[in-house]
Amino acid sequence: MTLTNRNLTASEQISDLGHKFGKIEQMAIIQTAPLLSPEERLARRKLMVRDAVSLLTLFLITAVIFALTWLLYQSFDSHRRELGQRWKARGEKAMSSGHPKEAVEALRSALAYVPSRDSEIELATALAAAGRTQEATAYFNTLWESAPGDGMINLQLARLYARVGNERLAVLHYRSALDGTWQGNGYDRRREIRLETSRYLLSRHEIDEARTQILIAASNAPDDPAIKLEIAGLLEQANDPQSALGIYRALATRKAVPLAALEGAGRTAFVLGRYRIADEYLGRALSGAQAANLPDKEEMADRDMLDTSMHVLLLYPSWRLMPHDRAVRIVAAKDIARNRLADCGTTSAAAPSKLASLVSRWEQLPPRITLLGLEQDPDLEQSIMQLVYDTETLSAQVCGPPSGNDALLLRIARNPDAVEQD
């Protein structure tokens, strides 16, 4: 135990001696290091300050250059946008003034300054209006590839393809325009496109498809007389006078009745053989103050239809008449038709054989027909009038169109029940 303690004491003493020698060595190094003079310390401080100022100066110069560059760019960009807007406004003004060629050049300049989708659409529209169909088609096809659901682009493509006679693509893009997206009031735009599509289909003699589109537009049309008159006119072109008549008559119930509605109602009723209605509306149209503004040709056509309607009603043996008056008209119609048959039978060698069945039916009538007998025999009245109608119809086929009262009876024969229909 004593020896171990002595050894530990010796090691501790060696460690103390090492620490003492280390401190002495450090003190010696400190004493031998050179000390800076006040002038050197000042020079060192100035050098540090100068370096800091230089760095700060470089930073400020960089900031100023950046600010100037940014201001110059903003000024250039503002000027560029101003020029772009100016050229765009010129192009739009030229288009509204009916000068698409000038609009094309202005809009090209606008795009060079400020490229935008709206300007591209306006340029393509101006190209189309200027008759540069191929360029316009290429432009719109490029726009369509990036936005195939855009209603305006599809509409323009439909018009371009319609212009060159490509019916398949024209109809395809018209339908896409109907289903496409529109800015603003898409409801009104779709109705306008549907009517435009129907006009195109009518020009291609696609009557059934056109009528379908018009009827859809009619079912969604607002209560606007101008729009309803347009739709009714298209329905007439689509061989649907019945639907057109319904629209015209509805417009004729308004307080301020459009003259076109009265004319349209009379005209379509006349086509349908509803001569009582035609007489009513054409009479109203021509007796009103607005009739003075009608073009001469239009007024003459209206008066011809009115005159024909009035004479048909005077000749027609209506069930609304007293029995005696109706019998008088039936006898008159019988005499007119029999004379027509006799005249027709002498026109050609083939006529008698074609009319033989009619001649046989005439021979089967009672030899003497009196007014009183007709009044008391409704079946005989019906038989005579049916024979009259068949005679006028077949005579027209064999001997050509009739004139005078025969022409009026032929009109009645086409649809006798419609003459006085409400």
Image (cartoon, helix red, strand yellow):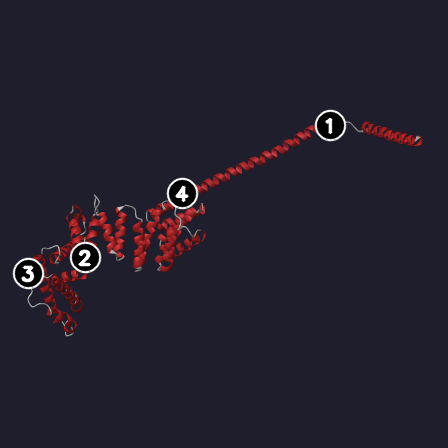
The residue tagged with tag 3: helix, strand or loop?
A: helix
Marks 4/3: CA distance? 90 Å
Q: Which residue is mark 1?
A: 40
Give the left or right position of residue 307, taking residue 96 as reference: left
Q: Is residue 237 left or right of residue 346?
A: right
Mark 4 Cα shell of 10 Å, populated few (<14), some (14-19), many (≥20): some
Q: Relative to residue 160, is residue 281 drawn left or right?
A: left
Q: Is residue 379 above or below residue 53?
A: below
Q: Find residue 217 and report its horizontal and vertical position in percent.
A: 31, 51
In the current view of this chain or complex, which residue is farthest to the bottom?
349
- Label 1 secondary element: helix
Disc 4 to disc 1, how far (Cα)? 69 Å
Q: Position of residue 108 (x, y in %)?
A: 42, 49
Q: At 18% across and 46% down in the image, what residue appears?
A: 290
**According to the image, label 3 marks what residue?**
372
The disc label shown at residue 418, or none: 2
Residue 86's label in the rendered image is: 4
Tell me if label 3 and label 1 are in contact, CB under 8 Å.
Answer: no
Q: Within 10 angstroms of label 1, few (less than 14), some, or many (20 or more) residues?
A: few
- Asked whether residue 75 is in view, the answer is yes
Three-letter code, disc 2: Ala
Are the residues tagged 1 and 2 within 8 Å (C-beta)? no
Alpha carbons under labels 3 and 1: distance apart: 153 Å
Question: Contact (CB < 8 A) between labels 2 and 3?
Answer: no
Task: Assign a secondary structure to mark 2.
Answer: helix
